[in-house]
Amino acid sequence: MNQYDPSSDSDSSESEEDDGNSLPILVQNAGGAVSKKGEECGGARSSKKRRFLFVALRLTCVCNKLLLSKGSDCFHPRFLFESFQYSCFPVCTMTSQDVASHYNAVPEKGLAERTQSRIFYLRNFNNWMKSMLINEFLEKLRQEGCHRPRVLDLCCGKGGDLLKWKQGNISSIVMTDVADVSLQQCESRYREMKDRGRNDRQELFSAQFLHADASKERLLPKLEGAHFDISSCQFALHYSFASEAQARQMLQNATESIRLGGYFIGTLPDADVMYHCIKENNGKFLNDVCSLEYDDKTVDFQTHIPPLFGAKFHFTLDKVVNCPEFLVHFELLVEMMKELGFELALRKRFSDAIPFFLKDHGSGRALFGRMQALEPYPPEGDVTLMGPEAEYSDGKAEFEERERENKWEGHHRTLGTLSQSEWQVASMYLVFAFQRVSE
């Protein structure tokens, strides 16, 4: 269903060829600072799971709480680590049909319309992040001797990652989603890609498309070739945390068919950041491109402790996406994955993932430009900025400093950046990866 998935639907921009014209990267910190750079769910619960629930009810975990540099700014790059206790009582309901209906109703947009979107660069930036995450772990598999991985793509949406998998030289993929219309569009995109490859005499990976709610039903009996090297769930795992039962079923589906040494990767809202923004703004955070609102209007945010499951909030992005979502406390996710034989291999907020991916992937910087993942500043000719001028104050300051001190490299006199509001949204997300270490 790829709910939210704030990434571009365009595949044509993902070429990793370096044209030598990549822009200097300037990503604004949202506060204004500059950063350069098994058992089926519902069956008898094992004693291990009973012990987990007992612990979870009293779970005290370390989480990152952001220090505020000014006012309600909750994105300063300094962090305070402190003890924080999560509760486990409210569980809210959200049917599969609710989610499917919402995403089936989202129209397919052409490239011209997408480029006019206020969040055009944010979507491309998030698409870049997914590309780098997928590349990172496909490369790890290759280094381990797995050159044609088998992939399980959960909540695949309209197939925005198909080209990424093609470029990763995978052998096969199973793509699942709860929204049947989105899945049909995904299959259609795959068939078009396959036809193009046939014309070019290039063999494409095999694919199975499965209409199912991975948080409500076990997928294994329906899968063709039920063994995978890697599974992926992009911008969607948090929807299953409406309840413990749904979260467990989703994680079972994501992991039980992964071989020893294989990976589960994805992107996820950072519960610590999101809840802090909500709390510091008395239940609702707003900026130029999004709104974030806690569902329970009766809570006292000075004393409220968000539940482990069912911590519901509403997220609107560019006046388009408005589907109920749920916080996923990452420390809880780590414990649940341990039960399934997986250990944490990677966790980085998007802001930290940028230098991490650029450090080891020379193609990453070029891919920024190829995917139009950052907005050029200042704009040239009759091109206008996507957001208000005030949202580019850091870009303006950096540009003026480079002009004064002649810091430009090569012939470019343009920076690549995001508006402050877009960076605030991007800062709410993280990338993760888990590796199976035991059966």
Image (cartoon, helix red, strand yellow):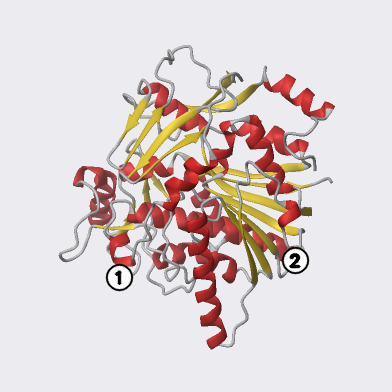
The quarter holding residue 191 reads bottom right
The reply to whether residue 114 is visible in this rendering is yes
Which mark is on residue 343? none
Secondary structure type for disc 1:
loop
Q: Closer to the N terminus: mark 2 or mark 1? A: 2
- Up-down: is 380 above or below 103? below
Image coordinates of residue 392 in percent, x first then y, are 26, 47
The quarter holding residue 420 reads top left
C-alpha span from label 2 to label 1: 42 Å
Left or right, residue 99 beside residue 150: left
Q: Residue at x 53, y 21 (%)?
A: 306
The reply to whether residue 29 is visible in this rendering is no
Specify few, some or many for label 1: CA neighbours under 10 Å numbering under 14, 14-19, or 20 or more: few
Q: Which amino acid does the dot numbered 1 rest on? A: His
> Which residue has dot 2 on it?
146
Image coordinates of residue 143 in percent, x first then y, are 73, 64
Q: Residue at x 56, y 62 (%)?
A: 361
Q: Residue at x 79, y 23 (%)?
A: 51
Does the CB distance between marks 2 and 1 fall below 8 Å?
A: no
Nearer to us in this view, 403 or 392: 392
Q: Residue at x 48, y 59 (%)?
A: 158
- Up-down: is 124 above or below 423? below
Which mark is on residue 411? 1
Q: Which amino acid does the dot numbered 2 rest on? A: Cys
Image coordinates of residue 325 in percent, x first then y, are 48, 36
